[in-house]
Image (cartoon, grey):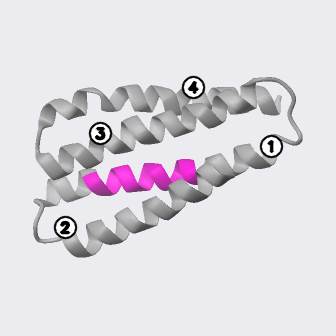
């Protein structure tokens, strides 16, 4: 629950930063990349809160794997997009799919936990 709340807080802050401080400083393409990172961070912050709620109802490791996968996904997927947008180093985009795979693993683990 703490991780979800923290990621949501940071996501809102980064969204405001992007909308106010970065608009006009980044190209529209780079701003869109930054906003994609924020959007996926917020989706998965909410998913982390759902994982926390499930922890009291689901047995086994799958729910724990889901939570950690979402955290790793936020750090790698969203983090690499933030870094790419702010630095313009396109090579950073090469690690973004690793975060996407972590998100997918989290959703599969969450489905297993729910089953």
Residue 28 position in % (x across, y down): 15, 60
Front residue (pair 41, 108): 41
What label does residue 54 carry, if any?
A: 1
Q: CA distance from mark 3 to mark 2?
A: 17 Å
Helix, strand or loop under label 1: helix
Q: Residue at (76%, 23%) from the top-left corner?
A: 61
Pointer 4 with pointer 2, Cβ within 8 A: no
Left or right placement of residue 14 versus residue 40 in this view: left
Q: Where, by quadrant of the figure, is residue 100 drawn?
A: top left
User: In this picture, is 49 found above or below 22?
Assistant: above
Pointer 2 with pointer 1, Cβ within 8 A: no
Q: CA distance from mark 3 to mark 4?
A: 18 Å
What label does residue 115 carry, if any?
A: none
Residue 21 position in % (x across, y down): 21, 72
Q: Which residue is mark 3?
A: 80
- Comes first in the chain, label 3 or label 4: 3
Pointer 4 with pointer 1, Cβ within 8 A: no
- Magenta: main secondary structure: helix
Q: Which residue is mark 4?
A: 105
Q: Residue at (60%, 33%) from the top-left corner?
A: 68
Helix, strand or loop under label 4: helix
Q: Which residues are magenta?
A: 34-46
Q: CA distance from mark 2 to mark 1?
A: 37 Å
């Amino acid at each position: 629950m703490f991780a979800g709340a923290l990621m949501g807080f940071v996501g809102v802050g980064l969204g405001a930063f992007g909308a106010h401080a970065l608009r006009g400083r980044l190209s529209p393409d780079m701003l869109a990349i930054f906003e994609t990172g924020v959007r996926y961070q917020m989706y998965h912050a909410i998913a982390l809160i759902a994982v926390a709620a499930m922890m009291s109802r689901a047995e086994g490791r799958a729910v724990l794997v889901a939570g950690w996968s979402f955290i790793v996904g936020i750090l790698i997927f969203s983090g690499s997009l933030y870094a790419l947008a702010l630095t313009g180093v396109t090579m950073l985009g090469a690690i973004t799919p690793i975060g996407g795979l972590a998100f997918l693993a989290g959703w599969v683990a969450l489905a297993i936990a729910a089953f």
